[in-house]
Image: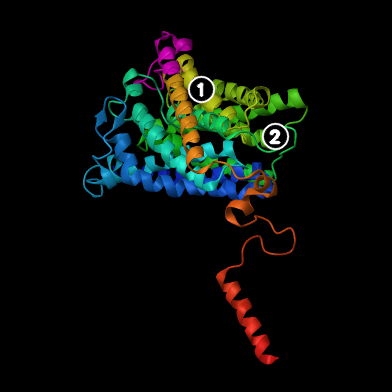
Amino acid sequence: MEGNTAWLLISAALVLLMTPGLAFFYGGMVRSKSVLNMLMMCFGSIGLIGVLWVIYGYSMTYGSDIGSLLGNPFEMLGLSGLMTPEGDPTAGTVDVAFQAMFAIITVALISGAVADRMRFGAWLLFGGLWATIVYFPVAHWVWADGGWIGELGALDFAGGTAVHINAGAAALGLVLVLGKRAGWPKEPMKPHNLPFVMLGAGLLWFGWFGFNAGSAYAADGVAGIAFVNTVTATCAAMLGWLLLERIRDGKPTSLGAASGVVAGLVAITPACAYVDTWGALTIGAIAGVLCALAVGLKYRLGYDDSLDVVGVHLVGGLVGTVMLGFVATVSVAPDGADGLFYGGSAALLGKQVVSALAVMVYSGLVAALLGLAVKAVMGVRVSTEDEVTGIDEAEHAEAAYDFAGGRGGRPSSVETGAASGAKRLEGSKS
């Protein structure tokens, strides 16, 4: 038990690291005048969802089932009855910590779609409402005792539906309400710091081992299978994305490599403990190619998903979830099911499609309605002038980089006091 507890605590820390990694990944992809706001949206998600989770989110997710739709939010309000060292820690406080990190990063993922233009306060209000009305119930559907997706028999080991389809659909619903960035798509909006993007992708990959292998809830062979498949599919997805770039554009890019890594991680998440090596390679390669193609849909369909949350997380999550209906195998997971390619029936494929579509429609619709509600209450966008000037200055009174030889933000209280003292001293001398 002690070994399993230690592994789950380490995994929780790895999953928390993914959100700062996401902040760098997203932050490098925006323009220099927006990078601090992007970092703040990710870090703000940590603070906001961390508080909501311990007050009622864990209870709403894992409390006693109510109609197969949600847990009792009052049963473990404020973690009542859980803050004790007695009993199995992997079913108590350690589980609270581990699952908190999933809730945090799911909300943070949405922020990339609204980069450059959403007010920080509006983002926090939306994030809190969406987590309450969408994430906590959907996580209950998938993972909690009595949740209808789990009872249906659909497979989702670590969050293809609950995390990635959920966040990707929410991103689409929110950007439709928010509207396009000023100048998009005519003006070029290139990533300002590709090394940040690569660093963020590396941190995400590192943390994802806690995400996937940690979901075994034990330091055992299942965790090992999830770990190896996470490596395998991600490598295949990166190569698939780069190959498509080489054929289509003539050059493989660092942004493509980083994006391919994330696409592979997303796609293997629901499947990592249910497929063999060939299944992992297939899922990764297909996800790399399809996600690379999907990011261009926003130009054809006219929705401004700033950092391709829809193209990578929604599409990648759909690939991994639906592909389980083809490549799942009981030779790896005896308590799972065989997909069509391994002699199984179409029943599993049907369950995977139903679960994916249900989460996608519910999350996207509610996100759009919440976006409209926040817009009516306080507005969701900064002004066009502030957007053009820079959302960092408008929302946070700071700048990430010192281009003019001064400070990038407001002077600190120490500096202000020192400057005032120097002026008084100069006056006394004169």
Q: Which residues are magenta?
A: 328-354
* SS under mark 1: helix
Which residue has dot 2 on it?
184
Of residues 384 and 301, the one drawn nearer to the viewer in this rendering: 384
Which residue has dot 1 on it?
318
The three-letter amino acid code for the residue at tag 2 is Trp
Residue 429 included in the magenta stretch of the image? no
Image coordinates of residue 104 in percent, x first then y, are: 44, 42
Image coordinates of residue 358 in percent, x first then y, are: 43, 21
Structural crowding at the residue carrying mark 1, measured as other residues with C-alpha within 10 Å and reported as few (<14), some (14–19) or many (≥20): many
* SS under mark 2: loop
Whole-Å distance between the Cαs marked 1 and 2? 27 Å
Q: Against 30, is 299 above or below? A: above
- Horizontal side of residue 246 vs 288, given as left or right: right
- Horizontal side of residue 100 vs 232, given as left or right: left
Q: Quadrant of residue 344?
A: top left
